[in-house]
Image (cartoon, grey):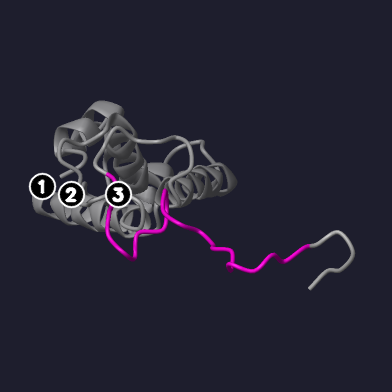
């Protein structure tokens, strides 16, 4: 797991039945399911450039997974932000930001992770993006 139940609870210290009231808080099994979904999403975005699952887990990936667990539609979004002053636009912006970051990571763009890169004939980042034919495409007096 890229993030943990404890990291979610640390991010939201008010994560207790007495302070939240209803709706009831998700149990650990539900939180594990949310984390698994977030981790799978992180892997899907990053697998083009990196070997997944990450081991050891870079802090950027842990933070992305934790953010997805809280702001993604499948995560704790409705529960956590439904009773807070944070509006939907702010939550949606946070979600779009983490997705944008994962897209960049998946393309091998900064932030570059200290993790094993994907290798092989179908690994595009760091590999050959295009090739030139042996013939010259441009000459001084003509363009092909």
Q: Which residue is mark 2?
A: 31
Q: CA distance from mark 3 to mark 2?
A: 26 Å
Q: Earlier in the sequence, mark 3 or mark 1?
A: 1
> Going 42% across and 43% down the picture, which residue do you hit?
81
Which residue, as the protein is rendered here, is positioned at the far right? 141
The residue wearing badge 1 is 28
Q: 142 above or below 54?
A: below
Which quadrant: the N terminus?
Answer: top left
Q: Is residue 18 above or below residue 78?
A: above
The region drawn magenta spans 117-138
Disc 1 element:
helix
Residue at 26% from the left image edge and 38% from the top image edge: 115
Residues at marks 3 and 1 touching, judged by CB atoms closer than 8 Å: no
Q: Position of residue 120 (x, y in %)?
A: 27, 60
Q: Which residue is mark 3?
A: 50
Q: CA distance from mark 3 to mark 1?
A: 29 Å
Q: Residues within 10 Å of mark 2 (few under 14, many from 20)?
A: some
Q: Residue furthest left?
A: 29
Measured along the vertical axis of the image, is residue 135 above or below residue 79?
A: below
For residue 88, side relative to residue 7 (left or right):
right
Q: Is residue 118 magenta?
A: yes
Between marks 3 and 2 in the image, the one whose residue lies nearer the viewer: 3
The verdict on residue 108 being magenta is: no
Mark 3, residues whose alpha carbon is within 10 Å: few (<14), some, or many (≥20)?
A: many
Q: Depth-wise, is mark 3 or mark 1 nearer the camera?
A: 3
Residue 7 x %, y %: 21, 32
Task: Of the two numbered discs 3 and 2 on the same chain, state the one appearing first in sequence.
Answer: 2
Who is closer to the viewer here, 85 or 115? 115
> Magenta segment, principal secondary structure?
loop
* Label 3 SS: loop
Answer whether labels 2 and 1 touch (C-beta < 8 Å). yes
Q: Work out whether residue 133 or residue 61 is closer to the camera in this orientation and state it.
A: 133
């Amino acid at each position: 797991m890229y993030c943990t139940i404890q990291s979610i609870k640390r991010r939201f210290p008010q994560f207790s039945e007495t302070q939240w009231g209803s709706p009831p808080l998700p149990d650990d099994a539900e939180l594990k399911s949310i984390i698994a979904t977030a981790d799978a999403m992180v892997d899907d975005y990053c697998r083009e450039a990196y070997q997944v699952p990450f081991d050891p887990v870079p802090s950027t990936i842990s933070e992305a997974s934790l953010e997805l667990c809280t702001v993604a539609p499948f995560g704790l979004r409705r529960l956590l932000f439904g009773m807070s002053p944070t509006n939907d636009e702010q939550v949606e912006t946070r979600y779009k930001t983490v997705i944008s970051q994962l897209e960049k990571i998946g393309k091998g763009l900064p932030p570059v992770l200290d993790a094993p890169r994907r290798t092989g004939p179908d690994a595009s980042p760091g590999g050959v993006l295009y090739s030139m034919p042996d013939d010259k495409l441009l000459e001084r007096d003509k363009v092909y």
